[in-house]
């Protein structure tokens, strides 16, 4: 039966190669049926990969330990949910998930556009299928999920598998990797359309309109995946933080940053015909950073907490990256005339300028994170010494960047296109600036002296004020005309221009998250050895260890330390941090932290074990102010993104000059109106 | 002044500031990867730099004393005594026999004072199927075939 899976994958690989060839040859030789055949192959690939994935899931659920992958990542006692998540618990299976998600996206793209964009679709299909072929090549041959255990030429099995590491057996494992993949993989689609548009020199910006929704949805998944990882690390993995600037974390952030830059700079192209080259570069960079991220996560070329063994897989990825980048650079340089800007920067005080700074600063952040992540590789190549940089490096550079971005978030939406007069700026920003300064003054009065924290809170107030003014102004105008109440008017306002007001909501979410991040400036920590009924203090809490219990069940041994939390002498809560030692081959230890989450601060307790004499418990206590604002802000961001995806009630038409074609172009024999590849 | 000139100056100022912050950050946190054996051979230099050492945690060598944790990191024949007293909890994957990475400085007395400990993570992106195949044969598992 396992041959079914292997066969499906190899067949899918062959079909993906066929699809590339059929699409390209069909386009070049004007054979429509070949192009259609290439598109049908995309659908067939989806079917085959669904069969292959279905088989792997089935093998996991039925404990088919003849498969090496099942034996390596599953065992009999795991609940069905984790047997399912074991699909992506290891290298080969997660590559299969990657391929299946890509095939699903490709099938949707091909289906949605079966009657549209006929000129550029062959190139879109070809681009998607080249990526697909690459991943299928990996799982067909070197990294097959369907390898069987064998002794000599006989297939064997094992009585029980190793199972998924207990640290991964949480419900978040079911959603964090797939969500992140839906993001990573999704960025191929805008890239494919960009390539199609570039190669065919498609007039207008049709590829941007088409891919705006795709990019938004993909960006939404990527944001969700990143935040889920952070939330999981904080609550479950128990090292007391949500972001460690670990290489694998950084790898997921890099394409997110360029995608954010892209989502903003496309507005420049749509409204002013500017930044065309830049947008192609951005969307290509996002795609290549996704591939790089996938490579970094799996190859072990950079030491990481998500560390994996050194693997030859990096060779494949580097080659793929190098070839891809070379091709895109060639295409851009060859078609520079098509990518000429239609207008230019007229004033530093303009919305164009603020978008440019937005992009500049986001790319600076991306570059610094990439640099810091790859520093060991670069330094070893240059100096022979492997040098790594740590969280302080990333924070030093990215905190000022974040603050500047916050400032732009407030200024950008209110500044005019082309040029703004100082008068209009003063009017627009008077109250928000006063609000920001007032916030800073109040905080200083309360004893806050941390410079970055003051700047951050001040800017957050500034941005929130600008957004509230925008909603208020628009809603009152509508309410005056329609007689609705203010709240209904705000909904109507948003519905009329979901892109703009959904965007504002996303900004609100970001601001709330920044407030959450800023809380870290005030973190407290205390580690104590405590005996029964001993107390110790942290922040405004007094903690008393009530008891020290231990026990055992089928899966693990546990040590429990119920801790009373008192404020001002009165008990407000009991927290129960726990230590576990799992049975089974790995004897994996696991600390189950206990968190008291409140909007203004979290109290976080970790039971680190007993002292050597076994008489006292080692308790690590932390106070994390404002950290819940991060999760709240994320939900606001998510809501705002969904609002952006709702079609606006009114379609806005923008009058602007636009190059629609070239007449008598020299030396290329292009007839007007005909797309020649 | 021409618009592009103004813009260009602002860009240079921003990038310059960030580059200055970055280089400060690099020199502050630059940590050199060394193996246990290399540390022994580094001589005087070893005490001046921040180092990152990888190795295996020797079974049974982990001792906790309140916030302090002592253990021995070994790599083949070389061993290194490590002392960690940071505020972050030790990773759950940190135990005897695990692979660990310690960041910190070498003290004059030869112990390594670590400010950060990482240990190999849970996800099994490790042994290729080929490496795993050997085990069932060794353990003599001949389940129903």
Image (cartoon, coloured by chain):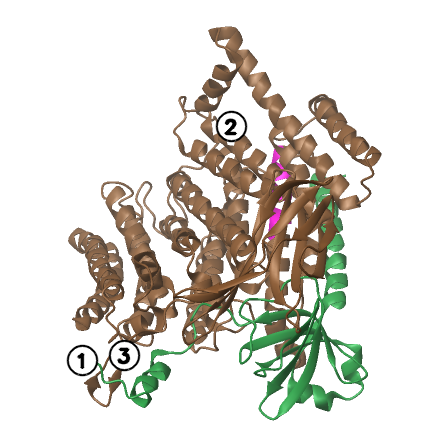
Q: Is residue A166 above or below residue A283?
A: below
Kind of element beneath mark 2: helix
The residue identified by callout 3 is A158
Marks 1 and 2: in contact by CB < 8 Å? no
Circles 2 and 3, Cβ within 8 Å, touching? The answer is no
**In-front residue for pair A247/A234:** A234
Question: Residue A211's quadrant in the figure?
Answer: top left
Q: Are marks 2 and 3 on the same chain?
A: yes
- Residue at the disc numbered 1: B144
Give the drawing colour for chain A.
brown
Which residue carries the number 2 mark?
A: A501
Residue density around tag 1, few if under 14, some if 14–19, many if 20 or more, within 10 Å: few
Inspect the magenta stretch and tell me whether residue A353 lies in it.
yes
- The local secondary structure at tag 3 comes to loop
Please report the residue visible at 51 percent of the width from the left and 49 percent of the height from the top: A227
Left or right of A12, for residue A420: right
Give the vertical position of B101 relative to A595 (above or below): below
Q: Which chain is green?
A: B
Q: Position of residue B37 (x, y in %)?
A: 65, 89
Span highlighted in magenta in the image: A351-363
Predominant SS along the magenta part: helix
The residues bearing labels 3 and 1 have C-alpha atoms spaced at a distance of 9 Å
Q: Earlier in the sequence, mark 2 or mark 3?
A: 3
């Amino acid at each position: 039966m396992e041959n079914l899976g292997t066969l499906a994958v190899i067949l899918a690989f062959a079909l993906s190669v066929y699809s590339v060839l059929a699409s390209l040859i069909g386009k070049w030789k004007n054979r429509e049926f070949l192009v259609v055949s290439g598109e049908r192959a995309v659908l067939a690939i989806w079917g085959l990969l669904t069969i292959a994935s279905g088989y792997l899931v089935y093998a996991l659920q039925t404990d088919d330990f003849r498969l090496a992958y099942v034996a390596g990542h599953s065992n009999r006692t795991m609940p069905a949910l984790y047997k399912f998540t074991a699909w992506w618990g290891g290298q080969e299976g997660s590559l299969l998930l990657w391929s299946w998600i890509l095939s699903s996206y490709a099938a949707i793209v091909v289906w949605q556009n079966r009657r549209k964009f006929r000129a550029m679709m062959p190139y879109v299909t070809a681009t998607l299928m080249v990526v697909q072929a690459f991943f299928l090549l990996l799982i067909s041959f070197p990294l097959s999920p369907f390898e069987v255990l064998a002794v000599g030429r006989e297939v064997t099995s094992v009585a029980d598998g190793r199972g998924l590491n207990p640290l991964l057996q949480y419900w978040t494992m079911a959603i964090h990797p797939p969500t992140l993949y839906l993001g990573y993989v999704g960025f191929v689609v805008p890239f494919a359309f960009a390539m199609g548009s570039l190669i065919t020199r498609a007039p207008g910006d049709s590829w941007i309109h088409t891919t705006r929704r795709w990019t938004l949805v993909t960006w939404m998944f990527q944001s969700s995946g990143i935040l889920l990882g952070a939330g999981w690390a904080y609550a479950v993995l128990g090292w007391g933080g949500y972001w460690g600037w670990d290489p694998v974390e950084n790898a997921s952030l890099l394409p997110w940053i360029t995608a954010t830059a892209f989502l903003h700079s496309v507005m420049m192209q749509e409204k002013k015909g500017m930044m065309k080259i830049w947008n192609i570069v951005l969307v290509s960079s996002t795609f290549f950073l996704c591939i790089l991220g996938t490579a970094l996560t799996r190859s072990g070329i950079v030491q990481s907490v998500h560390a994996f063994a050194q693997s030859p897989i990096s060779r494949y990825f580097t080659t793929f990256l190098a070839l891809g980048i070379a091709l895109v650079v060639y295409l851009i340089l060859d078609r520079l005339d098509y990518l000429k800007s239609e207008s230019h920067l007229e004033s530093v005080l303009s919305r164009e300028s603020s978008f440019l700074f937005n992009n500049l600063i986001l790319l600076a952040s991306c570059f610094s994170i990439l640099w810091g992540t790859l520093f060991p590789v670069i330094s070893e190549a240059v100096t022979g010494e492997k040098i790594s940089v740590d969280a302080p490096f990333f924070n030093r550079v990215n905190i000022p960047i974040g603050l500047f971005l916050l400032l732009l978030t407030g200024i950008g939406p209110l500044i005019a296109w082309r040029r703004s007069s100082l008068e209009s700026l003063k009017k627009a920003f008077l109250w928000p600036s006063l609000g920001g300064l007032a916030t800073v003054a109040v905080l200083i009065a309360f004893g806050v002296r941390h410079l970055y924290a003051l700047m951050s809170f001040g800017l957050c107030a500034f941005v929130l004020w600008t957004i509230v003014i925008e909603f208020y102004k628009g809603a009152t105008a509508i309410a005056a005309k329609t007689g609705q109440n203010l709240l209904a008017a705000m909904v109507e306002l948003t519905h009329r221009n979901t892109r703009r007001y959904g965007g504002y909501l996303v900004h609100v979410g970001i601001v709330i998250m920044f407030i959450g991040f800023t809380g870290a400036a005030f973190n407290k920590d205390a580690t104590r050895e405590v005996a029964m009924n001993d107390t110790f203090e942290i922040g405004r809490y007094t903690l008393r260890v009530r008891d020290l219990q231990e026990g055992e069940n089928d899966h693990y041994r546990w040590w429990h330390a119920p801790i009373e939390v008192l404020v001002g002498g009165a008990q407000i809560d009991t927290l129960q941090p726990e230590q576990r030692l799992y049975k089974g081959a790995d004897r994996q230890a696991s600390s189950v932290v206990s968190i008291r989450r409140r909007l203004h601060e979290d109290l976080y307790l970790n039971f680190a074990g007993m002292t050597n004499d076994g008489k006292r418990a080692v308790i690590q206590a932390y106070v994390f102010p404002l950290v819940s604002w991060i999760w709240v802000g994320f939900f606001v961001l998510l809501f705002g993104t969904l609002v952006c995806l709702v079609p606006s009630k009114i379609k806005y038409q923008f009058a602007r000059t636009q190059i629609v074609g070239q007449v008598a172009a020299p030396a290329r024999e292009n007839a007007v109106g005909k797309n020649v590849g | 002044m021409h618009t592009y000139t103004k813009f260009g100056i602002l860009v240079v100022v921003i990038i310059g500031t960030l580059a200055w912050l970055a280089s400060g950050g690099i020199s502050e946190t630059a940590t050199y990867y060394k193996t246990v054996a290399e540390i022994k051979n580094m001589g005087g230099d070893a005490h001046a730099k921040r180092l990152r050492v990888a190795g295996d945690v020797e079974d049974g060598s982990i001792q906790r004393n309140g916030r302090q944790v002592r253990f021995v990191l070994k790599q083949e024949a070389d061993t290194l005594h490590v002392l960690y007293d940071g505020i972050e909890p030790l990773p759950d994957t940190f135990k005897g026999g695990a692979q660990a990475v310690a960041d910190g400085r070498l003290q004059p007395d030869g112990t390594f004072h670590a400010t950060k400990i990482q240990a190999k993570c849970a996800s099994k992106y490790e042994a290729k199927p080929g490496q795993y195949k050997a085990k069932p044969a060794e353990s003599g598992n001949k389940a129903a075939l």
